[in-house]
Image (cartoon, helix red, strand yellow):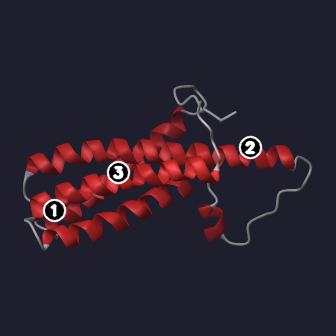
Amino acid sequence: MPLKIRWSSKEYMPTALILLGVCGLFQVLIIAISQYIFYVGNYLIITIIPLGTIAALYFASIMVYEAFAQVERKEKLKRQYIKSGSYSSKIKAFLNNSIARPLLIIFAFFTTFFFITFFISSSLINNQMAFLISEIIAGVVCLLIANYFEKNYAKVRRF
């Protein structure tokens, strides 16, 4: 039975708001890079398209968070009485954080696909349309990656 977190509950609302806020801050960084380095000057494209991308990144990070929570729950049920080991470094502790791990995965894939598609499409068309295409493609790829994590890593089956 797949784990389905009720995000509107009192327990998980702060986690959901943290995920949404970090996705928004990440898009603000991408917008700043696009405006000041890549000279994308159309304010309509800079404001409307990233709102949809924030929603896509938020949904993808929630899917990856639920996948990791499902695997963690299975491991906890398998190994109930084994001592939990401490992490050897602060970097490993940060990377094993339940909120940071899905965000880092999603942001790494988004950044990679955004810049690859932006540089390829900016050589063919103007910067505004290249930004538009790269935001949409990177957002869709993040959703596909999150779906892959949900299906193959956590082995969640939806009926």
Q: Secondary structure at mark 3?
A: helix
Answer with mark 1 or mark 3, whichever residue precedes in sequence: 1
Q: x, y percentage for residue 26?
A: 35, 55
Mark 2 neighbour density, 10 Å: few (under 14) some (14–19) many (20 or more): few
Q: Is residue 98 visible?
A: no
- Where disc 1 sits, the SS reads helix
Does 88 appear above or below 131?
Answer: below
Instruction: Name the foreground residue: 46 vs 132.
Output: 132
Q: Mark 2 = which residue?
A: 73
- At label 2, the amino acid type is Arg
The residue singled out by tag 1 in the image is 130
Residue 78: in sight, yes or no?
yes
Measure the alpha-carbon separation of dots 2 and 3: 28 Å
Task: Tell me if residue 35 comes above or below residue 19 in the rendering.
Answer: below
147 relative to 151 in the view: left or right? left
The residue that label 3 is drawn on is 140
| Amino acid type shown at disc 1 | Ala
User: Contact, CB < 8 Å: mark 2 with mark 3?
Assistant: no
Image spot of residue 93 (x, y percent): 66, 63
